[in-house]
Amino acid sequence: MSTTTSNTANRTDQAEDAVRELNAIALGASGAIVAAAVMLLLGVFGAVGVYEGAVAMMEQWHLFFEPTVVGTVAGMVEATVISFVLVYAFAWLYNALAR
């Protein structure tokens, strides 16, 4: 009986540790994928002429983004790198403060 109680307590401790610890690389990669998808959508919308205000803001905020094929790919690369770095830094800081 004590073995079952001990195993349950260990699983609870492991679950609590897993909740507190973020996988910084996985979270950074997720953010990078979302950013690339958003840039792709904005590139397509810009080429079609939809959401021109959002496209204009992205052109101001991102150095390489334009509603062309090359500009969209360059914007996707830029957004991927920036998002990965920022989200990775956030996860690293969170893990450091959660200890």
Image (tube, helix red, strand yellow):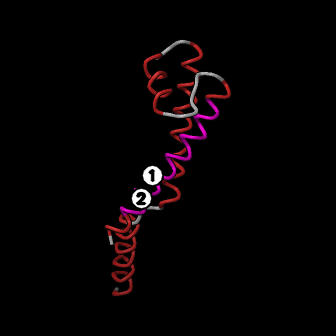
- Give left or right: position of 69 versus 88: right
Q: Mark 1 points at which residue?
A: 87
Give the number of callouts: 2
Which quadrant: the C terminus? bottom left
Residue farthest along the bottom direction in this orientation: 2
Residue 54 percent coordinates (x, y): 44, 22
Mark 1, Cα crowd under 10 Å, few <14 / some 14-19 / many 20+, is many
3, 20: nearer the viewer: 20
Residue type marked 1: Val
Q: Please, what secondary structure does the residue beneath circle 2 have?
A: helix
Residue 28 percent coordinates (x, y): 50, 53
Please report the residue visible at 49 percent of the width from the left and 22 percent of the height from the top: 55
Q: Please, what secondary structure does the residue beneath circle 1 have?
A: helix
Discs 1, 2 touching: Cβ within 8 Å: yes
- Residue 91 is marked as 2
Residue 35 percent coordinates (x, y): 51, 39
* Range covered by the magenta-colored residues: 72-94
Please report the residue visible at 56 percent of the width from the left and 47 percent of the height from the top: 81
User: How far separated are the C-alphas under marks 1 and 2?
Assistant: 6 Å
Mark 2, Cα crowd under 10 Å, few <14 / some 14-19 / many 20+, is some
- Residue 68 is marked as none
Residue 93 percent coordinates (x, y): 37, 62
Residue type marked 2: Ala
- Give left or right: position of 36 versus 16: right
Q: Main secondary structure of the magenta part?
A: helix
Which quadrant: the N terminus? bottom left
Please report the residue visible at 40 percent of the width from the left and 73 percent of the height from the top: 14
Residue 1 higher or lower than 24, as above or below: below
Please report the residue visible at 47 percent of the width from the left and 16 percent of the height from the top: 52
In magenta stretch: residue 20: no
- Give left or right: position of 78 versus 94: right
Residue 47 higher or lower than 25, as above or below: above
